[in-house]
Amino acid sequence: MTFDLGWEFAPAKSLSQPPESGWKTTADARPSVPLEIKPWILNGWKEKTVWFRSPVIPDLPYENPVLYSPLVNQSIRIYLQSPDGNLNEIYNFGRPELGKNGYAGWPNHLIDLPAYATGCRIYALVYSETISASLAPASALTIGERSERIQSILRRDLARVSLGFLFFVVGSFCIVLFLRNLSQSLLGAFGLFALASGIYVVSNRTLELQHLLYYNPRFWMDLEHISIFLMPPTFGLFLIQVLPGSRVLRPIAAVLLGYAILGFVAHGFGVLWYDLLYPFFYLTLLAALTIAVVILRHALGGSNEARIILIGLGFFLGTAIYDMLGALALIYWPFQAVTWGFMGFQVALGSILYLRYSDTHRQLAAYSQNLEKMVEKRTEDLDRSLREVRKLKEKQDGDYFLISLLMHPLRPRDLIVGDSRVVMDLRQKKQFEYRGRKSSIGGDVCLARELELQDRKYVAFLNGDAMGKSMQGAGGAVVLGTAFGSLIERARNSASDRNRRPETFLRDSFRELNRVFLAFEGSMLTTMLLGVLDVESGQLHFINCEHPMAAILRNKEAVYPPQELTTKLGLAEPSAEPVVNQLQLQPGDAFCVGSDGKDDVFVIDAEGEEVRNQDDGLFLRLLMEHGAEPSRMLDAIEQSGEVTDDLSLLSVLFH
């Protein structure tokens, strides 16, 4: 329903109430009053504040009626006269009563009308300083259904907005290519120009779709002005790359860029964009004419690139000059044309880029012809390397398998002596497969043997961790396990050795084991916990050689008992005396020890990040939750996070 005829206007003597009389009708009865031009044309138009009054609103056969007023210049307040004669404000944009300071941009306006609007009048206070003070462009003011107005805007502007985004993407892509290879300055200059042009197409005031996407008129206005300031100097930079022999282009580009920088600085000190744009329009118009002459001269001189640019530039400059003249109100300007002019110009510039990089294309073509041969040769080299790697891998796995056979007698085996038990489990980190047989090696070892000292039955147990990865750690574990077995066999077969106290047995064992590892001159170090348990009394003696702290589980409560550490094997002095710790176990107690793999776990923290476990109490909590059975504890530790080392657990269960 058109609603653009029969309007009246009156100068705004009061900014709070429309006048009682003095209303006039424009020549075409539409809500638009032309502004007078200022004496100096570069300063634009004389601002004006005007009241408009509509005819009586007819019946509204709509579910959601709106008054559609596109691109109002510049700020507005709209009132509806209620049935009792009072004015009720139903919409405002900017603050027209503040003049220039109330200015906010050029959005479309979809103004909701209340149910009582039929039979009432609309009053509008409009401030403008750009060409005319108007409620809407001629023949554009309508009343209709909100959804239909929005669909109309989408149909009209979607193609242009899509084209603007295309320019933006092309420009961004060219800039990325330039940043990857700074020698390609032509791509960089073109990318800046295309980027600025794409921003202008999307943000310029003749479009309304952007306000439906993001309603911030001042943002779109500033973005449009910034892009207008950037397009001419970036185009000058592009031409400098295409026509490097011209002496005129550099000064022109420098002047345009200097004015753009000056404009940004001046705007930062409060100067309005519009006051800065009018001189810039004329400066750009003059520069465009000069550039056209330069390109024409190069084209006549035989430059194919200049000829291609001339064709595209002629079309582009024609539309750009048309838009600038229209913005200056020097010609009739029913629509914005520079978008489509730039599209034609893009085709011409694409041809320039193709000619500039034709040599590169030829090199790529030659390279592609030889590519198959190069790929075959490279594949042969890779296959040869892969076969060598497989041979080395098979040899390495064979070495691993041999070590695993040596470690087989040292595998964990539970031991029951009387009512006491020693249970253990071990999972080495290094897993491998050799000729269809799966196995593993590592530096952890868990052993337990029955022992008799001074006619009393004991259980001797060992949990050790040899330093180093894979082969080195496995070698240390074999040495430790073999030496421990030798100590036990000697104690069984020698009457003098059987007559030793538990503390003496532990000290002698430490000294012998330390001498064995000292022979490696520091290249093989080992931590261990070596202990003996009196299976009848529950008296426990142990030496902790810088091994992780042992824990006691008693009545479902787990704690670390006091214990002193001894220097690790292979690092202690030959004459060093170990510290023997003593504990009295009670029936039902479990003495639990494990390698550092139980603590070297990557867990997820409160922020969702994977971090190395720093909580010493994790092992105690898992003991209380899952008990002292090593196999269950190993499963619980692996479920708590990623295990990064060999992992072994040994529990001594008394009665």
Image (spheres, rainbow, N blue to C red):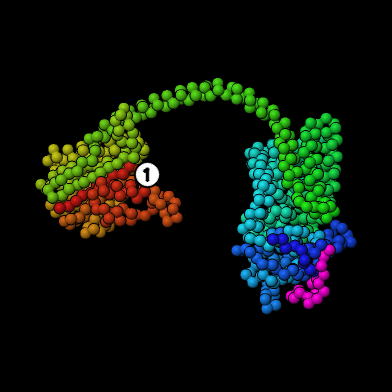
Picture quarter containing residue 573? Answer: top left
Q: Is residue 417 magenta?
A: no
> Looking at this view, is 638 or 469 the one in front?
638
Q: Main secondary structure of the magenta part?
A: loop
User: What's the amino acid at mark 1?
Assistant: Thr
Q: Which residue is located at x 82 percent, y 37 percent? A: 295
Stretch of the chain drawn in magenta = 10-27
Residue 548 showing in the rendered view: yes
Q: Which residue is located at x 33 percent, y 33 percent? A: 432
Residue 327 point in image, percent of width and height: 80, 54
> Looking at this view, is 164 or 293 the one in front?
164
Q: Label 1: few (<14), some or many (≥20) within 10 Å?
A: some
Residue 381 point in image, percent of width and height: 49, 23
Q: Can you name the residue that lies furthest to the right here?
A: 39
Q: Which residue is mark 1?
A: 644
Q: Which residue is located at x 33 percent, y 54 percent? A: 618
Position of residue 255 in the picture relative to residue 210 (left or right): right
Position of residue 407 in the picture relative to residue 266 (left or right): left
Query: In which quadrant is the N terminus drawn?
Result: bottom right
Residue 367 point in image, percent of width and height: 61, 25
Q: Is residue 22 magenta?
A: yes
Position of residue 306 in the picture relative to residue 636 (left or right): right
Residue 110 showing in the rendered view: no
**259 is higher (above) or lower (below) than 242:** below
Q: Which residue is located at x 80 percent, y 34 percent? A: 307
Judged from the image, the secondary structure of the residue bearing numbered disc 1 is loop
